[in-house]
Amino acid sequence: DKVAELMPGGGYYTRILAKTVGPKGHVYALVPTGFAKRPGGLDALNALAAQYGNVTIVATDLASFKLDTPVDVVWTTENYHDFHNGPTANIPGLNAAVFVALKPGGVYFIEDHAAAAGAGTTTTSTLHRIDPAAVISEAQAAGFKLAGQSKLLANPADTHDKAVFDPSIRGETDKLALRFKKPG
């Protein structure tokens, strides 16, 4: 399989994905251009690319990225809410770029910190959370079909009123896990 990972950070999941797809598969680590230009911003990912050989780092504008080959999966973990923040936020552009990058039948996987139902995108910059219904609506607006959702990472004890970095909830937030498919 070929996988595009959006905003891989230090590469925690990049490593897992590289091992999962194996030497015949490939992982494209898509890093925002601004992050890539930071001193040391790519050090961890460069080390992974050297170690595994099936990882390519792509510094790009996430709202308009293009890959040379269609991928089977686009993966993002705990940062979809971040795509809503900042002066260059462009969710329709991001989701359209993901749609184009995927093969027909390809999977768009989004895992993130859940906000309270009805919060929409109002807590993306303050609590670093997003309402699952907002994610579903945005992905469907780009042409994706919701193919599955999991409660495996859910935490019903999370009151959704604290930032994900608050010590009382850090590492224990209620999370959404959504799988979308590109028709085809």
Image (cartoon, rainbow, N blue to C red):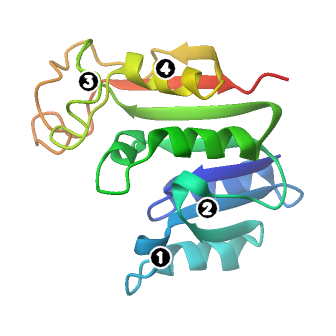
- Residue identified by numbered label 1: 36
Q: Are marks 3 and 4 in contact (CB under 8 Å)?
A: no
Is any atom of residue 77 visible in this view? yes
**Distance Cα–Cα, label 1 vs label 3:** 29 Å
Of residues 5 and 86, the one drawn nearer to the viewer in this rendering = 86
Name, please, the residue furthest toward the right: 24
Q: Which mark is residue 170?
A: none
Number of the label disc, if any, that sits on residue 115: 3
Type of amino acid under label 4: Ile
Q: Nearer the viewer, mark 3 or mark 4?
A: 4
Label 3 or label 4, whichever comes before in sequence order: 3
Q: Is residue 6 visible?
A: no
Instruction: Say which label, 2 or 1, has the lower sequence index.
Output: 2
Residue placed most toward the observer, 184 or 4: 184
> Which quadrant of the figure has residue 114?
top left
Please state the horizontal and vertical placement of residue 139, each as a whole percent of the image. 55, 27
Disc 4 residue crowd, few under 14, some 14–19, many 20+, Cα 10 Å: some
Q: Amino acid at mark 2?
A: Ala
Callouts 2 and 1 close, C-beta under 8 Å: no
Label whose residue precedes the other's in the sequence (2 or 3): 2
Instruction: Using the rendered view, name the quadrant where residue 120 is placed.
Output: top left
How much space separates mark 4 and mark 2, taking CA atoms? 24 Å
Q: Amino acid at mark 3?
A: Ala
Residue 172 falls left or right of residue 56: left
Q: Considering only vertical position in the picture, is 162 above or below 159?
A: below
Query: For mark 2, what is the residue?
Result: 29
